[in-house]
Image (cartoon, helix red, strand yellow):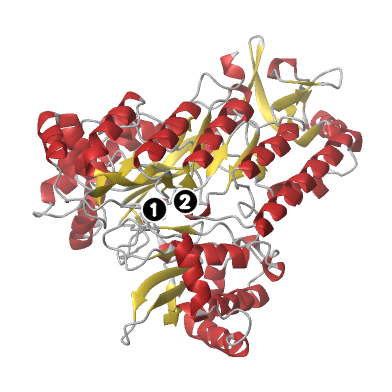
Amino acid sequence: MYRYDDFDRQLVHERTEQFREQVKRRLAGDITEEQFRPLRLMNGVYLQLHAYMLRVAVPYGTLRADQLRQLGMIARVYDKGYGHFTTRQNIQYNWPKLDEIPDALLDLAKVEMHAIQTSGNCIRNTTTDQYAGAAADEIEDPRPYCELIRQWSTFHPEFTYLPRKFKIAVTGSPNDRAAVKVHDIGLRMHQNDAGETGFEVMVGGGLGRTPFVGKTIREFIGKNDLFSYLEAILRVYNRFGRRDNKYKARIKILVHEEGIDKIRELVEEEWAQIKDGSLRVDDAEIVHYIEQFAPPAFEALSDDDADFERHKSENRRFANWVRSNVIEHKQPGYAIANVSLKPIGGIPGDATDTQMELVADLSEKYSFGDVRVTHEQNLVLPHVKKADLFAVWSELDKANLGTANLGYVTDIISCPGLDYCALATARSIPLSQRISERFGDLDRQHDIGELKIKISGCINACGHHHVGHIGILGLDKRGKEFYQITLGGDASQDASIGKIAGAGFSEAEVVDAIESLVTKYIDIRESGERFIDTYRRVGMDPFKEVLYGDR
Amino acid sequence: MSLQVVTANRLEDGLVVFLTSDGSWSENINDARIADGKEAADALLAEASAPELDIVIVGPYLIDVEQQGADIVPTKYREVLRTKGPSVREDLGYQAV
């Protein structure tokens, strides 16, 4: 588990007190908004449509029970009783008052949390597989490396003013659940021919107004060399990344304009200078970090539990939840339980104070006090005994957290959109709610199978629409909301950027348009095909035809 | 005829406010002072951008509005949302009062 050392503790407390003084000076008029803005942003404080917004970091999406409980308390005391989990595995509060934010940060610091690296042109909070340390398919837990990246990148003096923000994602499994190919740097753990474990390094992926799938800059880098190699990439970016145009400042543009071969050459040249220096991490140190993430004290259990099987056969709703939301664990007798924050017709990613406290309590009782936040805006109890799943589900269900829809058409990613965000051009949440209601029938969801719908309320693409099997982008057309549909996006190991289907749809038309796409898929799919598989087989034309006919 | 008012976010809590006839800031758009035409709008924005207001509000700007009976209504949906609150949470924001 993420372990604060004294250094972290001091750093965060100092930062909180600094910010308290900065807020005081701002309110007294000693500094202007222009001077204050970068300072508040470095502490995760944005000014949104209706109020300030505080974004809190959840390093690599891992939370302890006491931390999640504190997040619930903060929602109640400093906000309006809820928080919003984001595609960056973080949490946002929508209504904090400026003069109370230093107190909120102090309360976060009490549970070793903060808002550092949630804004600004720095290396942001590192993200990873929400099933890290639990997934049956992983090579190794990726979090020790995420933690090393966190320590290396936090307040890195050279990388505090990069040309633009910088996001790193890591997967320890060949089945990528962390969308690593659409990050500035994506790391995929794998083994080389000599049987050593290391990482494929991908660079220049990203979404936003210019989406790209990352390109491989190095097929394999050993664990000891990872950090000097990352430093070399960041140095090349810091030196050559464009600062003349905000929209061309991400590393993806540099990689696109210069070509991956040229970037590789520059990085290798830089790396040769520093690879044997202080950033080389020796085996003993890596072991030290791996120990911090040692598996909890699992009991030796049979993988079959008679009570679990009985509950499934007796309770159809529980069986449905197991079918979609429970994932295989590496430890026999245990399972990974996903907590959907997508109730039918609800707001994707929102959780109330009491829901957070309940999940915290359940994690303490049933999952070694371990909770995860997913980039698809759900929560996870990663280590639940199969024998306890029914009890867990029963409690979740009572709190409207037992929706059985993980990976289905109603498990929609949606950014806050124009309902909250100052940058948005259209609303995204109401659309996600209407789609969820349209497809809410569970038998229908089972029939449709895996279908990832992702909605963004502007071209910045926080809702990942480019990598939705069906992506929806909300735009403003002469003062009216309208929605552009993309097809064929994918955030997994087979990452691809969706293609625009054609002209946009009005708010009134768009849900029917989505339904016509789903109906077409069901008509033409072959056995075992998901929506994305059918799309890849038949291409855009059949779908375009149902959307536009002869138009 | 183009009608405009000045809006901003209040420094201490970030809430949406509008410049009123007496130079104060109100949470209710119906209290806003309306500028009719470009010249009046420029003067209104200049007043709202005075350096001493930097400790009261953040980011003042002009928005287009229409007079609908007794109500002042923004022409853009984004600004309508700012006068009300999130459309998906009618229990929150000014619309909840």
User: Which residue occupies the foreground of this view, A195 or A156?
Assistant: A195
Query: Residue A489 sits in which quadrant?
Result: bottom left
Taking the image as shown, residue B46 lies to the left or right of residue A174, namely right
Q: Residue at x 55, y 36 (%)?
A: A70
Distance in Å between CA atoms under marks 1 and 2: 7 Å
Task: Please report contact status of discs 1 and 2: CB closer than 8 Å, yes or no.
Answer: yes
User: Which residue occupies the foreground of this view, B3 or A267?
Assistant: A267
Taking the image as shown, residue A286 lies to the left or right of residue A523, namely right
Label count reads 2
On screen, A502 above or below B56?
below
Instruction: From the top left corner, tell me how far across and down residue B8 is, in percent.
Output: 74, 32
User: Which residue has dot 1 on it?
Assistant: A130
User: Which residue occupies the foreground of this view, A123 or A385?
Assistant: A385
Instruction: From the top left corner, tell me how far across and down residue A21 is, in percent.
Output: 83, 43
User: Which residue has dot 2 on it?
Assistant: A61
Query: Mark 2 Cα within 10 Å, few/some/many (few <14, many 20+)?
Result: many
Q: Residue at x 65, y 73 (%)?
A: A238
Chain assignment, label 2: A
Give the numbered dot on residue A327: none
Amino acid under disc 1: Gln
Q: Specify whether residue A211 is in view.
A: no
On screen, A52 above or below A495?
above
Q: Secondary structure at mark 1?
A: loop
Q: Specify whether residue A84 is in view.
A: yes
Q: Residue at x 27, y 32 (%)?
A: A391
Q: Residue at x 65, y 46 (%)?
A: A44
On screen, A234 above or below A425?
below
